[in-house]
Image (cartoon, rainbow, N blue to C red):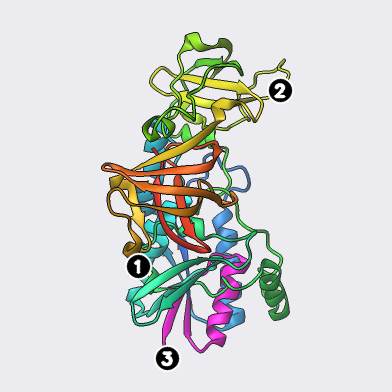
Amino acid sequence: MKRVVVGLSGGVDSSVAAYLLKEQGYEVIGIYMQNWHDTTGLLYGDCAWTDDVNFATLVAKRLEIPFYKVDLSLEYKKRVVDYMFAEYEKGRTPNPDVLCNREVKFDLFVEVAQKYAADYVATGHYARIEACEGSGIFRLLAGVDRNKDQSYFLCQLNQKQLSGALFPIGHLQKYEVREIATKLGLATAQRKDSQGICFVGQVDLPSFLMQQLKPREGEIIEIPLDFPPYSIASNGLDELSKAIVYKKSDGKLVGKHRGAHYFTIGQRKGLNVGGKAEPLFVIATDVNENIIYTGQGQNHPGLFRKALFIEKKDEHWVRPDLKLRPEQSMMVLCRIRYRQPLQKAQILSGENGLYILFDEPQRGITSGQFAAWYIDDELIGSGVIQ
């Protein structure tokens, strides 16, 4: 009998994942990962993780499986939270959930599972893994429920990690998962989905970042709608893939802020500038000069770019057999954030990295975020946006 360790989070998805695996004949062990203790900046509750543990305990009892708790908070802080602070300090916007999966759930947690002689690690992700017979290749596929598909968060996993992972609910719709949990009488059946930063929770981001990044008053500059951006028709990929660099003289002073490193491209909240015909959105930040550049309306041209660039060191191919050689290209579907509809694009391999050229200009391309690319519903690669 194969043994599998399930990351029981106290939510309905991992609860049903554990049940399905037991029904399939696996020997199932439930383990709760406690990766964060500090409540600074949390919006709700003082000890949200204690509720999670209690729910996970109830589920394990109901399913009659062993249950344990492991504290990985020191390594989580090093590998995920410290990276997050460092990126924000540089004026970039990281995705801690992607890092959490790569560094914690399918690395550190795998090491924990091995101590229990587990053959697999399983989670409640809405994604699927398919083994290609005879090739040793594992395909990472989108979840069947397109509204809950979480393949994007798994975009940095490698073949070794996929070979030892199971996603038991990837073929189900969310309502089906809740129906199963309700029928079984699981305590998590109607529990709300978790939100916010992986294992930290829902936070007030500036308050959270203030733990290490101190407030510093700076200027908010508004860039007019008719500011001349680059010409999509005339410039090459190098120019198309770079964010526009603004100067103070390109616009006018409209307000003050507490620190450019607290803001990200496309952000509307927190600017506190009124009296405009349309809301202001962040179109660029300069952490060196501590300036935020904004534009009126969600269709301000400064919010859009036609292309992005990923440095060679930041390329990651879930399917290494499909990796592009220099000067090669391929047509893909791409997303630059979770839940963004897949966009038609072309990937071109250059000397120093990858260019992704979209059929249509994309809103809010942000340095530090991950771009993930697909062929049909298979995620084949990803990389950090420059």
Distance CA(mark 2)–CA(mark 3): 62 Å
Percent of width and height locating residue 95: 46, 46
Q: In which quarter of the image is residue 300?
A: top right
What is the three-letter code of the residue carrying label 2? Answer: Glu
Using the rendered image of the protein, determine whether residue 82 is visible from the camera's viewpoint.
no
User: Quarter holding the C terminus?
Assistant: top left
Residue at 30% of width from left, 48% of height from top?
A: 327
The magenta segment is 1-29
> Does residue 30 appear left or right of residue 76 in this picture?
right
Percent of width and height locating residue 222: 58, 16
- Do residues under tags 2 and 1 come within 8 Å of each other at their CB atoms? no
User: Around disc 1, counting alpha carbons within 10 Å, would you say few (fewer than 14), some (14 to 19), or many (20 or more)?
Assistant: some
Distance CA(mark 2)–CA(mark 1): 47 Å
Disc 2 on helix, strand or loop? loop
Q: How many labels does the image show?
A: 3
Look at discs 2 and 3 and give the one toward the viewer: 2
Q: Is residue 302 magenta?
A: no
Percent of width and height locating residue 208: 50, 37
User: Quarter holding the N terminus?
Assistant: bottom left
What is the three-letter code of the residue carrying label 1? Answer: Gln
What is the three-letter code of the residue carrying label 3? Answer: Met
For residue 1, which numbered disc appears in the image?
3
Percent of width and height locating residue 71: 41, 61
Q: Give the camera-side residue of 323 and 154.
A: 323
Would you place residue 145 above or below residue 228 in this image?
Answer: below
**Residue occupied by mark 1:** 159
**Residue occupied by mark 2:** 278
> Does residue 41 appear left or right of residue 351 in this picture?
right
